[in-house]
Image (cartoon, helix red, strand yellow):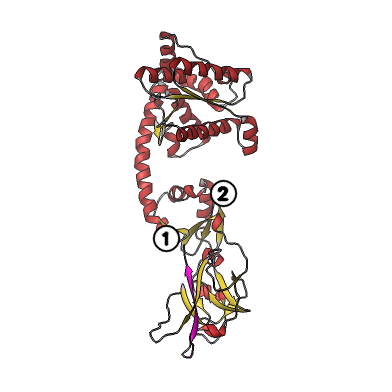
Amino acid sequence: DSVVMCELFNKAGFKFGIAHCNFKLRGDESDGDQNFVKALADKLDVNFHTIDFETAKIAEERKISTQMAARDLRYEWFEKILKENTYKFIATAHHKDDQVETLLINLLRGTGIAGLHGILPKQKNLIRPMLEFSRDHIEKYVLEHSIKFREDSSNASDKYLRNKIRHQLVPILEEMKSGSIETIHDNILRFRDAELIYQKQIQQVKNELLVKEGKYWTISIPKLQEFDPISTYLYELLKDFGFSFSQCEDILTNIEGIAGKKFRSESHELLKDRDSLIIRMISEVPKNETLSLGLDEITAPIKLKLKKIRKTSDFRISRSPDLVQFDSSQISFPLQLRKWKNGDKFYPLGCTYKKKVSDFFIDKKVNLFEKENAYVLCSGEDIIWVIGYQIDNRFRIRPETSEMLQIEFVKD
């Protein structure tokens, strides 16, 4: 199939190069394939790119199958060639039979609607111009034009699921009903149309339900519950965050439960809050550390801008929880920046009594992720500011205050 594609490209007058991977899995046979493809490139007078991979070793290092490693290595290298040269596309010679085999593999392994569209003819810069031709059609063309080719001996083995389907299942389907392969291929085209309709609806739901709020994504639980089947909608909302269908079912099992339950994918963490699901990247999970601050700008773990200012006649106290002023005479340097912890207490602005920071957060209906990301700024042992929420009343601006410390919390 690949040789025929090259011959057709050459006949059409296309400018192209040939890329060949030697995966070092079949000894001398692999080297023979490499030499054959080099000779083909020389015959067609096109550029030849080749590379050797220690595929078995790399598969072990990446903890994936040899087949998966070979596929990943191949496409990673193809992309590299594309960037380093003037080629516009990567063309592979997948044909109609490969298309049908892929659908059957997906059905046997379990799939959603995306697994029914088979191999797409174009994905970004990857094209598959041979998809309309069957294996029989390609083999007849080879015989009619006396084209030399090499067959991968592993194709004859039933070690892999694709080969079992090719050698055992497909012949049975053709025996049961002649033309089954063509029928399945036609159905794939219909499945693609159905998927377009499906994805359009899913995108509308994503636009409605998936809301970006700073570093988090939120999904309203009451709104989500208006959609049926809810498990499918939730999976489509969460799959890009790495959550599986079974995890989505677990989330739904706990959706009426108390707030605070967490779920993790490899890349994200989901919190079941009171009336919403909140998602954040695992890299956003905060670390607990204490920093000493002078009158400098800091950018990590959060961004703060500090400066001393004089109180003038036209001065107005900021009402923003992110831009605050303190009476400098009440503050001792260096200040301490740290995560808040259970047991922390402060005097919220306007209060003459101490309040636990945890109770303050409950009153403000601060969700668990926001609590985990909350910092406090301390002067000595005293909290002067629950950052982004409230200053301590003891450090407020008074009529007699002449010099102030102004701090701005700059959110991403």
Secondary structure at badge 2 equals loop
Specify start and end residues of the magenta stretch as a single range: 400-412
Left or right, 198 with respect to 274, comes to left
Q: Which residue is mark 1?
A: 222
Query: Circle 2 is placed at which residue position?
Result: 266
Which residue lies at the image location 47% right of the left edge and 59% below the top edge?
Answer: 216
At x 56% / y 85%, what residue is drawn? 330
Chief SS of the magenta region: strand
Rendered position, 81 above or below 357: above
Q: Inspect the magenta stretch and tell me whether residue 402 lies in it.
A: yes
Quarter of the view holding residue 157:
top right
The Cα–Cα distance between marks 1 and 2, rounded to whole angstroms, is 27 Å
Q: Nearer the viewer, residue 227 or 379?
A: 379
Q: Amino acid at mark 2?
A: Glu
Residue at point 46%, 63% (across, down): 275
Packing grade of label 1 (10 A; few <14, some 14-19, many >=20) is few
Quick one: 173 or 152, which is closer to the camera? 152
Residue 145: quarter of image: top left
The mark that comes first in sequence, 1 or 2, is 1
Q: Residue furthest bottom?
A: 400
